[in-house]
Amino acid sequence: AMLRFLRQRVAGVPPPPSQSPPRHAVAAPPSKNVKRELKPLLCDMCKRACAARPTDVDAFFVAYLERRPAFIQRSSRDASRRDLLSEWWAPPDRWRLVWADEFDYEGAPDSTKWEYQTTCNAWVHDDEHLELQHYTERNAVVEDGCLKITARLEEEEGCAYTSSRLRTQYKGDWLYGRIEVCAKLPQHFRGLWPAIWLLPTDDAYGHWPSSGEVDIMEHVGWKEKGTVHAGVHTRTSNHRDKTHRTSSTVVDDAHDAFHVYALVWRPDRMDVFVDGDLVHTVLRSEEGDWPFDKRFYLLLNVAVGGKWAGKHGIDEKAFPATLEVAYVRVYRKHGI
């Protein structure tokens, strides 16, 4: 019954007004076969179901997932990981929404929540970065219910490519909580570098990397298709000193479907997830430095080239290349 309900929703067929979502669909955990079929349906429905408004019938699907963490735990193999996933996919009464953009409007990104960061054009091309794009205020737009950040093959200010880089600094700054970004990556080509990441609002411990950086999702186009990376940078753990520790996973359809990239940030640890599957953990007790007790802000961008992403050149068939974001949501756990 639940699969029939979901197939109808994927096809855009709403249930009759008098018909409620099938209650018995949440009466028991889904079987292995049901979970296998639900996985692609979740990808197809992510933009509608995961981004559903509380008044939308699709919110039933979100409620189902919240009540059934066993579905989210489909690839869990140990008890500690299951505990983490249960904590991440906690019921709403344990988390409160403190900031969000559902991109349910058209035009430029909401200026009360986002800033185009073009000042970085002054340094992203230097020898430390070697990025090839010029960031503009026209390469990011909200349309069709998504934020779309597009890198293009076009000359501007001495650069062969243009793109956009958005940040929430002074409009969305947080200390601890759960940050979720539902996104679909650009198509897989050499030279592209889409990223979902955090930087410190105030640089309380000094310039990068002393005040920290959190990478929720990075993809570089010369790696295996669908490979996403997560990690943090600190004074004692960063790529410049070759002490950087990261984790990666392969999301087979990352370039064709929406997935939820999330950070759960607590005073003593950080955990990064993709669709509820744990990808990377950083423990305060194991770090030589911990700048993550100050507020951070979110950045979304598509870079071209760079020391990492550009090391094998640029495939010009990549353009235009668009990172699509269905929503950004930030939650705070009650009591923190």
Image: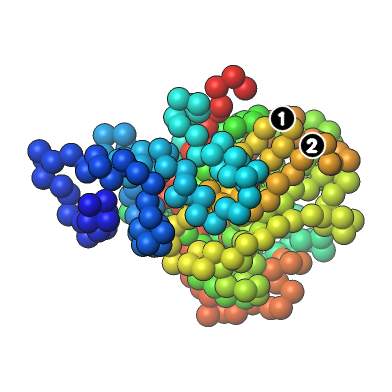
Is residue 189 depicted above or below 214 in this figure? below
Element type at marker 2? helix
Q: Position of residue 80 (x, y in %)?
A: 65, 43
Q: Residue at x 63, y 50 (%)?
A: 78
Q: Residue at x 37, y 62 (%)?
A: 33
Q: Quadrant of residue 336?
A: top right
Whether residue 66 is visible here, answered yes or no, is yes
Q: Which mark is residue 233?
A: none
Name the residue type under label 2: Arg
Residue underneath mark 2: 284
Name the residue type under label 1: Pro
Q: Residue at x 39, y 46 (%)?
A: 29
Judging depth in this view, the residue of 271 and 225 nearest the camera is 271
Is residue 258 depicted above or below 16 in this figure? below
Q: Residue at x 65, y 29 (%)?
A: 175
In the picture provided, is 190 more to the left or to the right than 56? right
Residue underneath mark 1: 267
Circle 1 packing at 10 Å, graded few (<14), some (14-19), many (20+), is: some
Q: Position of residue 181 (x, y in %)?
A: 51, 47
Judging depth in this view, the residue of 123 and 224 nearest the camera is 224
Which residue occupies the extreme top position in the image?
Answer: 335
Circle 2 packing at 10 Å, graded few (<14), some (14-19), many (20+), is: some
Element type at marker 1? loop
Q: Position of residue 197 (x, y in %)?
A: 64, 48
Q: Position of residue 91 (x, y in %)?
A: 45, 32
Q: Quadrant of residue 201?
A: top right
Whether residue 261 is visible here, answered yes or no, is no
- Contact (CB < 8 A) between labels 2 and 1? yes
